[in-house]
Image (cartoon, helix red, strand yellow):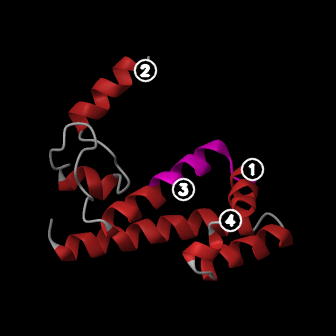
Amino acid sequence: MEQAFLDEMKAKLLEQKKTILDSLAGQSEDMKNLVKTVESGDEADVAADVIDRTLLTALGTQDANRLQLIENALDRINQNKYGRCLKCGKEIPRERLEVIPYALMCISCASAEERKNR
């Protein structure tokens, strides 16, 4: 996958992460301080279980899941594994990633997974 596209997706993911965290920060002063800690700290420092648990408790389930998917996608970019289906290993179409930048699977595998989980 070309670097310009990866940079674009990383920016998109970081913007989505910021939107979720800004929404959380707007809920209360304590949450605002917690979000500042998460956004400004070194990732190793920020990964404290207490912060993670507090954030996940404060976030709705949907936002918590999306935040986790975003974090995982950013990790895959850093590991040069972004854009590959976790199930079959094929490249996820660029169009799919533009719509869902944190997609884990290609459309075929995602559809099969959905059918299996019904």
Report the quarter where the N terminus lies: bottom left
User: Who's the residue at 64% across and 72% down the image?
Assistant: 46
Which amino acid type corresponds to the residue marked 3 in the rendered image?
Answer: Leu
Residue 32 position (above or below residue 68): below
First in sequence: mark 1 vs mark 4? 4
Which amino acid type corresponds to the residue marked 2 in the rendered image?
Answer: Asn
User: Who's the residue at 70% across and 77% down the image?
Assistant: 37
Residue with the most extreme right position: 29
Residue identified by numbered label 4: 48
Residue identified by numbered label 3: 67
Of badges 3 and 4, the one in the foreground is 4
Residue identified by numbered label 1: 57
The answer to whether 63 appears left or right of 88 in the picture is right
User: Who's the residue at 33% across and 69% down the image?
Assistant: 78
Cβ atoms under marks 4 and 2 closer than 8 Å: no
Determine which quarter of the picture holds residue 80: bottom left
User: Who's the residue at 37% across and 25% down the image?
Assistant: 114
Q: Which of 109 and 24 is in front in this view?
A: 109
Disc 4 to disc 2, C-alpha distance = 32 Å
Q: Give the range drawn in magenta.
A: 58-69
First in sequence: mark 4 vs mark 2? 4
